[in-house]
Image (cartoon, rainbow, N blue to C red):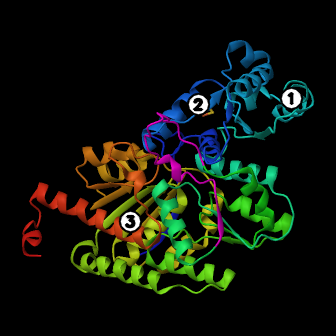
Amino acid sequence: MSCDVKVKDRTGVINPIFTCQPAGAQFASIGIKDCIGIVHGGQGCVMFVRLLISQHFKESFEIVSSSVHEEGAVFGALDRVEQAVDVLLMRYPHVKVVPIITTCSTEVIGDDVDGVVTKLEEELLQVKYPDREVHLIPIHTPSFVGSMVTGYDLAVWDFVKAFAKKDEPNGKINLITGWVNPGDVKELKHLLAEMQIDATVLFEIESFDSPLLPDGSAVSHGNTTIEDLTGTANALETIALNRYEGGKAAQFLEKQFSVPAMIGPTPIGIRNTDTFLHNLTKITGKPIPQSLVRERGVAIDALTDLTHMFLAEKRVAIYGNPDLVIGLAEFCLDLEMKPVLLLLGDDNAGYVDDPRIKALQANVDYGMEIVTNADLWELERRIKDEGLELDLILGHSKGRFVAIEYNIPMLRVGFPTYDRAGLWRYPVVGYAGATWLAEQMANTLFTDMEHKKNKEWILNVW
Ligand code: SF4
């Protein structure tokens, strides 16, 4: 038995797992305070992405389209960027950071976005907004390369490149969370607070779980400030929790400013959370406090109640963002489950060299398949045509139809999850995340046992 890594052996994509690069850049930009991005392309490049993000968080936020039309698609559309910047700055006097995010069409046209940024800085900003702090940041995210995951990674790198500035050491840790939920940010901040560690949590979207207040404000904004980004060059170390969602920026800070980079682990499950905390201790010298030892114990107790009796041997398929998929697979293995199929939705050739994937290949003693450049048809085809037997599916809401069609229990996890309430509020990282994930997996299986009358008696005697 073995763990094979293979590329989908079919051209074309049926029901994609990911959307395109500009979506990732838009997600990164909503984590910055006083920032509204301009997506340079057709309106759909904003409309659909904004809809996805809003459906997921059930919140409203602002993002702008340069709204390229036929004429611009033929003759170039830089005039639309110039107008968009001007209108945005007039309409939103608080905005300081304006990423200009390219798309497939404007990259194919060959619009010189870097050139127009220079022009705007020398003309519009000098003449019309001379006393205003405005940063225009070109972000190149053609959609025919990579995916929303690489778009996020690129945008984080571009923002850090634009702002990081060497100064006195600030004694802080840079923490790049990657593509996570407000519940994850809250849990990460909790772990840092318990360890009394001063960290800059970057591109952080905790406030996307936002209240409705008496003043009627209902628009969500990220919390990372320009000062936070500037200070990244002066930190003790950068921890990028997700290799593919922030790793590039961490490496840049190491190379450019000698701020050491620690890539991963994605702190999903007990083992990876332990490593994360030990890494924090190594960097700062701060010990892991008893409060976290106790939290760990509570989590292990919860997992012990479920593992042997309910979760062991359950066959799981997992799809979504690569760091999430790998972290979930590692956690499932620790719970004695059998992740049999991992689907990674883009063609990153580096996946085969990922040490975590190599570790899976070296240690798995049953048949596991890892498919890159995968789509949801790869999941459906295996169930329908190859008789793949699954006890559970872990993935975002776009795969719900496979679970429904083939009557397989599914736990929604990842982005986007719009067909279950409030999932953004719960962490998958840290000890709290480990408990939540294990209990949700178990509850999903319990519901299925009741529904199918499958060993339902176990639930009555437990
Ligand atoms: S694939 Fe191209 S046209 Fe479609 S949303 Fe992405 S960037 Fe826009």
Residue that carries the numbered disc 2 in the rendered image: 46
Identified by mark 2, the residue type is: Val
Q: Are marks 1 and 3 in contact (CB under 8 Å)?
A: no
**In the rendered view, does 292 fall on the left or right side of 404?**
right
Q: Looking at this rendering, what residue extends furthest in the top direction?
A: 71
Magenta stretch: includes residue 102: no
Quarter of the picture holding the C terminus: bottom left
Task: Confirm or reject: label 1 Cβ below 8 Å from ligand 1.
Answer: no
Where 145 sits versus 130, above or below?
below
User: Which quadrant holds residue 111?
Assistant: top right
Where 377 sits versus 452, above or below?
above
User: Which quadrant holds residue 304?
Assistant: bottom left
Element carrying mark 2? helix
**In the rendered view, does 406 fall on the left or right side of 131?**
left
Identified by mark 3, the residue type is: Val
Task: Please report the bounds of the magenta region as a residue range.
Answer: 198-222
In terms of sequence position, does the residue under pointer 3 or pointer 2 come before the other? 2
Nearer to us: label 1 or label 3: 1
Nearer to us: label 3 or label 2: 2
Element carrying mark 1? helix
**In the rendered view, does 174 fall on the left or right side of 437?**
right
Front-lying residue, 140 or 184: 184
Image quadrant, ligand 1: top right
Residue that carries the numbered disc 1 in the rendered image: 120
Magenta: main secondary structure: loop
